[in-house]
Amino acid sequence: MIHASAIVDPSAQIGENTQIGPWTLIGPGVVVGDDCDIASHVVIKGPTVIGNNNKIFQFSTIGDATPDLKYAGEATRLLIGDNNIIREGATIHRGTMQDRGETVIGNDNLLMAYVHVGHDCRVGNHTILVNNASLAGHVLVGDWAILSGYTLVHQFVHVGAHCFVGPGAFIYHDIPAFVTAFGSPAEPRTINREGLKRRGFSSAQISLANRAYKLLYRRGLALDEALLEIAALGDDAIIGLFLDSIKHSTRGIIR
């Protein structure tokens, strides 16, 4: 299952039924789970832990050190979960000691061609990062978020769960959960109604989400006033998701 031309460090741990293509380099400190398919010309450096059933396409570089000038060679790491697809030319860097010391990618994500995930990022589950989307350091991307092609995300930005970001957007401030954003700099447009429907949210919940969005973005309220009125809509999970994504904002939200 390992091509004769592949270079695999003796300390690397390779799971059962994992295939490694020609001219791929797997360095020391790398752990790859079961049933993975690693194509040709892939570079994986450690410390990196990759879960089960991941597919990594050619010319990707996984687990390399960050170019952040504050990084001084500390033993940081990259953690990748299960069932991810990482397309050709993607780059994913390990963390730095200026944060938690690790970059984390969850489960069931699709990272398309030439996507970049910078140091100390945390990418949730079921996300899609379309071709050439780029995350600077310390970015958080919530579950089910979709970043269209050529999206640029500034460092420390949080992109909420179920968000949809249009192509070529530059995201400088946090995006609350289930909001769609377009433009450079990114501006809010509406809720991700279709995405919420596909994820199994009820019509009543989607209606609540729309009311919460309008309170925040269409009534001209100060942020504190909007949050109070949104909280008064009830304790449905979708309202809690929206409020949490705003209250935990570190850079301020797009408005």
Image: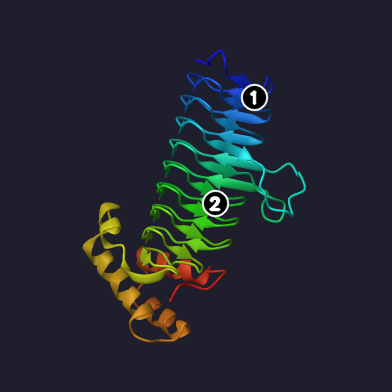
Whole-percent x, y for residue 92 in the image: 56, 43
Q: Identify the secondary structure beneath mark 1.
A: loop
Whole-percent x, y for residue 243 in the image: 44, 70
Q: Residue at x 56, y 46 (%)?
A: 104
Would residue 189 be found to the left or right of residue 176 on screen?
A: left
Whole-percent x, y for residue 219 in the image: 34, 85
Would residue 109 be found to the left or right of residue 122 on screen?
A: left
Q: Is residue 81 above or below residue 102?
A: above
Label 1: which residue?
12
Quadrant of the image occupied by residue 201: bottom left
Q: Earlier in the sequence, mark 1 or mark 2?
A: 1
Q: Name the amino acid type tagged 2.
A: Arg
Q: Residue at x 52, y 36 (%)?
A: 60
Query: Badges 1 and 2: C-beta atoms under 8 Å apart?
Result: no
Label 2: which residue?
122
Q: Identify the secondary structure beneath mark 2.
A: strand
